[in-house]
Amino acid sequence: MATRAISPWRLGVVLWCVGFIIMTLYWLNSEYTRQHALFRQRASAYAQTVSQRMEQNESVMLSLELLMRTQSQLGMQDVQRFTQQLMQRYPHIYSIQFFEEVSREQAPAFVQRMKQRGLFDFQLKEPATDQPQGWRPVRPRSLYHPIVMIEPQQDGQNSQLGMDINADGQHSETLRAAEQFGHMESTAPFALPDNGRGYLLVKAVQQHGTRGGEPRQAFVGILLRHDRLLADIPLANSHAHDISVVFYPRVDRAFDNMFFRAPMTPAPAWESTWLPRFHFEQPVSSTAQPFLIKLDYQLRGGDLNLQPLVYLGLTLGMAVGFAMVMLSQRRRSRQQGMEANESLQREREMAAMTLQHIHDGVIRIDSAGRIDYLNPMAATLLQTPPEQVIGQSVFAVFRLHFEMSQHMQDNPVNESLKFRRPVELPENTSLLRKDGQSLLIEGNISPLPSRQHLHAGALITFRYLGSAHNKIRDRLTTSQKRLREHEEKLAHVARLNTMGEMASGIAHELNQPLSAIVSYNQACLRMLDDDYPDLELIRSAMHSTANQAHRAGEIITRLRAFVSKQPARREAISLNQIVRNTLMLAEHALREHGIEILLNLKEDLPPVEGDSIQIEQVTLNLLTNAIDALRHKPQPRQIRLETGATAELACLKVVDNGPGIPDTMLSKLFTPFSTTKPHGMGLGLTICQSIIESHQGHISGRNQPEGGGSFRITLPLQNAQPSSAALCEKEPLSHDANAQL
């Protein structure tokens, strides 16, 4: 007979019940621990506050002891004022009392002395409940301890003065211990006339400064009342606490040692039966006030936090329900898994068949770069049978060569394995075969993650581009070469055109040194015809002639270099020197139009790498545009040239105070044949942009907020490779040199 399987939902109910019981026991234990910790925290804070107040009592007693020793010098009013300040600062103190020890023989003289102080009704007395006034004259005994002053002053204070505090002898041991050891002592708790409980903290002092010159034995007492000492001490849920403060002396005494007792509110029977009762007991740290603080707390049902238990029950129910749903679907999932495995097997067979027949080469490598699979097309392109390369390093079989590369290329396979990211084969990548033949290919390398999301290797896919691509590449190379030659010719034509426009000014600049040379030579000839020629003056004139000839030679050399047609030559150049050379060429035009040049050149400017003639052409073009913009502007006319540098770039700015760039031209400054000049061709800025970009730099133009146009050139420093974002950055020039030409 087949065994009947248990229903998944019945099993779930059983599991939930067992789990809920275990969770309930765990919750009860954790809740008990939490509530006990909270109770001990509250009780410790309560006991600490009581201890602090009792320590304050002792501090007040030390102050009063010092006061008692100097009472005769201070006067009664000073003593009262001082005690009043103490009472205001420590409101938990009920009263402060001063009393003396008087023998039976000294009693008449003591009473007379107190009357001389102004207490005319003063007499020694003791409490008497059977008398209407509550007291009677003292009965004869060896020692009296009458009160001589009490603060705060209350109604009927005079009836308390002269009262013997030890009339019934209940404080004899305390007073004797205080007098014998000189320590602070506490009396046992006693009942107060108004049905309260209190105790007296006393200290024996020697009072000096008496008329006879001998010290008197006196006492300082602080009366602490339970409702004042324990007032305003916070205790959460205080009605559920049983609080008691018990006096425990150092010696056995027969008295009621209960100072304070506040019983808890009765709890329901089920709480007292099923919920725990916590107990806390801690002695006060003060040795002079030996009290024991006891707190009991009956845990209430409202204290329990049932929310975690509810959450745990719901979570367990959802978990068991989910498990039962999974269990009920297990058979269906098993069937679906078998079908999925069959489908996966078919897909694998189709994928293997596809790899066998595609015209792209596929190579799979592991994380160490060893080949573990290649398809027939890859074996054909590599001219290597698959069984000979399986297990070999891919770098020994799949050898690449990068043609026409401007930078050193890392192996793409190594890069993909190292950084675990897809990598495209660079353009013009060739595959080197065993026979020495190279095949132009394209493709990529993609990392292969494992099931554990680890790096399991990479997949190389590539295809042969054929001879047609080689022809296209050769034609493109030829076109690029012709384009560069055409740009150089166009730049040369632009320089010649610029020199043509500035010919009259340059001729004027050459005429000045030549005229000076003629004048100096004619003067020298006339002086040589004299009978006694001044040779020193002639020598000075010849030196001046040589200087003017040198100046004319520099102008001609600079013009020849500027207009000559020569191949571009990259070398280290200084933008500051470029600015000075350009100003020398445009000096006549600047002077003719009354334009003031403001130079702001950075000292020790790092060099850039480029062709000095081409950079001078760009600078001269920008300077000429600024001169044209200022032709019809009233004075002042100013052009500011600035250079500066950042960590990777050198910068050159040409700024004028003219009318600025028209808004319609801002978006097409560097578009060919776009110009605002009547006879301009619109190619100047286009050529400038081409030259700067060939130097891997950037040129831009904009209007100044205060008026005028501004053009900015950024070029990479020598041996620097800045990003495109850095070339377009708008940082201010990092220098403060300022000179005016």
Image: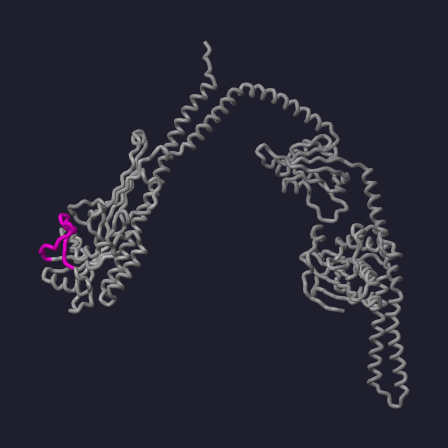
Q: Which residue lies at the image location 37% right of the left edge and 32% below the top edge?
A: 28
- Relative depth, front residue between 117 and 227: 117
**Residue 183 percent location from the top left of the image:** 21, 57
Quadrant where the N terminus lies?
A: top left
Tell me which segment is drawn in magenta. 122-142
Q: How many labels, in total?
A: 0
Q: Which residue lies at the image location 16% right of the left edge and 47% below the top edge?
A: 252
**Residue 135 lies within the magenta run:** yes
Examine the image and state in which quarter residue 472 appears.
top right
**In the displayed structure, does residue 457 sit left or right of residue 303?**
right
Q: Is residue 528 visible?
A: yes
**Residue 363 percent location from the top left of the image:** 68, 34
Colour basis: one colour
Examine the image and state in which quarter residue 489 appears.
bottom right
Q: Main secondary structure of the magenta part?
A: loop
* Residue furthest out toward the front: 132
